Image: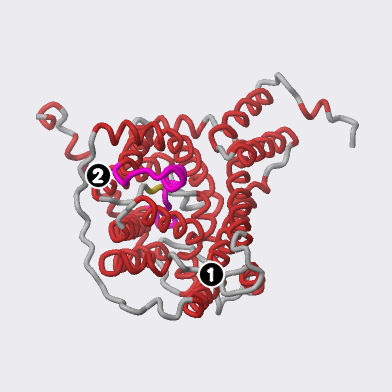
Amino acid sequence: MVFLFIPELPDILCKKTDMWIKDILNNIKSFRFNRHEFAGALGDMGTFIPILVGMVTVCGLNAGSALFFSGLFNLISGLIFGIPIAVQPMKAIGTIAINEGLTLNQILAAGIVASAVVFMLGVTNLIVFLNRHIPLSVVRGLQLGLGLLLIINGIKMITNTNTIFGFDSIAVGAFCGLLVLFLFFSKKFPGALVIFAIGFIFLFLRTPDILRGFSYELSIPKFVALSADDFISGTFRAAIPQIPLTTLNSVIAVCALSWDLFPKKGADVRRVSTSVGLMNLIGCWFGAMPMCHGAGGLAGQYRFGARTGGSIAILGIVKMIIGFFFGAYAIKLLSVYPLSVLGVLLTFSGMELAMTSRDIKTRSDMFVMLLTAAVIIAFHSTAIGFIVGLAIAYLFLYGIVRIEKLDEGTD
């Protein structure tokens, strides 16, 4: 019936489909599969592994489904965007779920609700409006604040081992950190690949019998029926805190970072917003971990060598195979992986993200950026930092306050 009233619609759909197919084919042609791309794919493990393990062990998330869908969306993201856009756990939902012991159904419902809001922002073009009216100084403040939080959390992961020497200790973290610096520009030995391998060596040295009883078990994703109570509880306990974080970090900040790192191939906010929405509107009904595209993940993967969508395509295929055949056993391994090594990966990811703020020049923009970052760190809230930074930025923009004039002659 629609085609009767809009006769040109089939042509429009055909043109759109042709454009998407052409983009995907061009992205595939740009893929590189080498040790640097593989090393870059590991750059986000410092965030991914702890949240995944926590949600599986504490909340009953199915390890196989979580890994399979995470890998599937890694692969699809690589095909669609052609750059190493990360697929990360939704951090607010993950943190709340682990700390408050949310049920699996509440977690999945929260992911669906949060992603539905972000999806609507994309399809209605509201996300484009938001992106156009957020000053660069606020975006840089978001990136700086989030980057510093990653650095802080990375260092905490190392120090919280509470051991000076050992297979998972402060000494291991210091050694791996120095090794990454030593290999910073090495073309033969990518830092992330080297220290990730070292992590597994220490894992087996600490728990030599970890492979005892090793076996594989097929993990086929199954539809999960959710009740109205699941949606009500999941929305108020986890989805509402997640929505601003996803909108600001997983859409606006990650797109800004993508244009910084890939000036000719940056991601479009509408496409990223739609992608985040579809991932969870599909995956969460089958037990997938609520996921998003994070700026920290992109920064980490770029820092450790990822330059094409090939990196996350590799990662996606590996995750899908592990999730489908070895999901439960993979979690057993990852749960004892040295946190000191993951902390190093997270720290350098944060540094890469924070350093994107170095292009801010004027004092008023610097003030807005630093204030936004400081509020994010102080309150551990992207939303509060964004609101404060945006308000101050517009006070400067409309000339209500002028920090440059106040500072004249004080140098």
Q: CA distance from mark 1 to mark 2?
A: 41 Å
- Viewer-proximal residue, 49 or 100? 100
Where residue 249 sits in the image (x, y, percent)? 50, 43
Q: Residues within 10 Å of mark 1 (few under 14, many from 20)?
A: many
Question: Dot 2: what SS?
Answer: helix
The amino acid at mark 2 is: Lys
Check if residue 86 falls in the magenta segment: yes
Q: Which residue position holds label 1?
A: 192
Question: Dot 1: what SS?
Answer: helix
Tell me if I can see residue 259 in this picture: yes
Residue 328, located in which quarter of the rendered image?
bottom left
Check if residue 357 falls in the magenta segment: no
Q: Which residue position holds label 2?
A: 15
**With respect to residue 407, does 67 lie above or below?**
below
The amino acid at mark 1 is: Ala
Query: Which quadrant of the rendered structure holds the C terminus?
Result: top right
Q: Residues within 10 Å of mark 2 (few under 14, many from 20)?
A: few
> In front: mark 1 or mark 2?
1
**With respect to residue 45, does 206 lie above or below?**
below
Give the residues in magenta.
81-105
- Viewer-proximal residue, 300 or 94? 94
Q: Which residue corresponds to the image point at 52% horizontal and 73% vertical from the top-left?
A: 199
Query: Which quadrant of the rendered structure holds the N terminus?
Result: top left
Where residue 296 sits in the image (x, y, percent)? 53, 52
Q: Which residue corresponds to the image point at 49% horizontal and 55% vertical from the top-left?
A: 297
**With respect to residue 70, does 127 lie above or below?**
above
**Dots 1, 2 in contact, CB < 8 A:** no
Residue 208, located in which quarter of the rendered image?
bottom left
